[in-house]
Amino acid sequence: MGVRRAAKGIGDFLVETLGEAVAEVILSLLACALLGGLALIAYLSWSFSPRLTIAGAGLLSLFLAHGAWQTFRTPAKGRRRGLAALTAAGFTVTAMTALFLLLYST
């Protein structure tokens, strides 16, 4: 009985380890593809219109800054609605994605 249980435990461990390795490779490829896509978008938009690229980057920064402010300020009574909820959610998703990539890139 002990040998079967040990073999099952080793098999489960190997399947879990292989699954984690495959997931790590897939996430790394997705991160590289995302970074390449962002670089391509930045290059193409800069070659099309540098002013529009800077304006878009400024608007994105403003969006994320407003979301950070909404996330970390003292909450008012009730829930956030409209633009405040959208920017807070956008900032949260961006921050969690950056944290995930930072923690799992090594």
Image (spheres, helix red, strand yellow):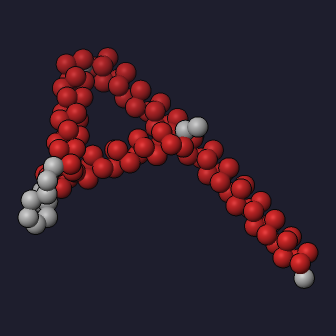
Q: Residue at x 79, y 69 (%)?
A: 9
- Residue lying at the far left of the rendered structure: 77
Front-most of residues 102 and 33 = 102
Q: Which residue is drawn at 68% across and 57% down?
A: 19
Q: x%, y% of residue 63?
A: 19, 40
Q: Does residue 94 appear left or right of residue 87 in this picture?
A: right
Image-based side of 53 in relation to 5, left or right: left
Q: Where is residue 15 in the image (x, y as percent from the top left)?
A: 74, 62
Asked if residue 87 shows in the view, the reply is no
Q: Where is residue 71 in the image (x, y as percent from the top left)?
A: 21, 50
**Residue at left 24%, top 29%?**
57
User: What is the residue that sits farthest to the bottom in this orientation?
Assistant: 1
In this orientation, which residue lies closer to the viewer: 33 or 15?
Answer: 15
Please say whether residue 28 is visible from this viewpoint. yes
The N terminus appears in which quarter of the rendering? bottom right
- Height in image: 90 above or below 7? above
Quarter holding the C terminus is top right
**Image point (81%, 65%), residue name:** 10
Left or right of 61? Residue 21 is right
User: In terms of image quadrants, where is residue 79?
Assistant: bottom left
Number of callouts: 0
Image position of 21 (left or right of 46) = right
